[in-house]
Amino acid sequence: MARGADFAGECAHIAAMSHNITLTASAAKHLNALSNEAGHPVMLRVMVEGGGCSGFQYVLDLTDTANPDESRIEYEGATALVDEVSAPLMAGSMIDYVEELVGSQFKILNPLAVASCGCGTSFSL
């Protein structure tokens, strides 16, 4: 899902890690709201596993602790975590939070994905 110029402008203000994985302002805002609601910092853990209908699938989880092998992606006080195995499969990706008619969710916009399933959690390279 491309968001055009608005998304590109938003990315100019996003922190990046070594694989250029970024966290959007929308994702940061939602993570900060979850942290405020919980009364402590909440981080989004993003992993890639084999499986799903397209070969790989994203596994998203909220956590309050980081593992030693995870890189931190920070923006506006919010943090996402990506492990060293998943990071190369997500190089150049944006972690976004979208609100649609069918619901709201974190979404990974991965430029390496050549195909994905309808639910948006499975992809192939």
Image (cartoon, grey):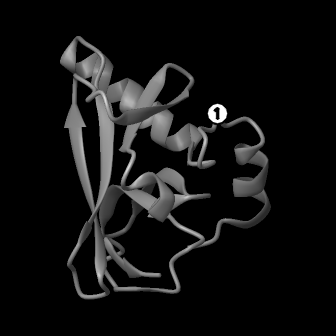
Residue 94, horizontal then vertical, whole percent? 55, 54
Rendering coords of residue 70 (x, y %): 36, 35
Task: Say above or below: 6 vs 51.
Answer: above
Left/right placement of residue 21 relative to residue 36 reads: right
Q: Which quarter of the figure has residue 57?
A: bottom left
Q: Residue at x 78, y 42 (%)?
A: 12
Residue 13 picture quarter:
top right
Residue 53 vertical placement versus 107 (above, below): below
Q: Quadrant of the N terminus?
A: bottom right
Corner quadrant of residue 107: bottom left
The spot of residue 105 in percent (x, y) is 33, 56
Identify the residue position indicated by label 1 in the image. 15
Pick the residue in front: 124 or 97.
124
Task: Assign a secondary structure to mark 1.
Answer: loop
Q: Nearer the viewer, residue 39 or 21?
A: 21
Residue type indicated by callout 1: Ala
The residue furthest top is 39
Left or right of residue 61: residue 33: right
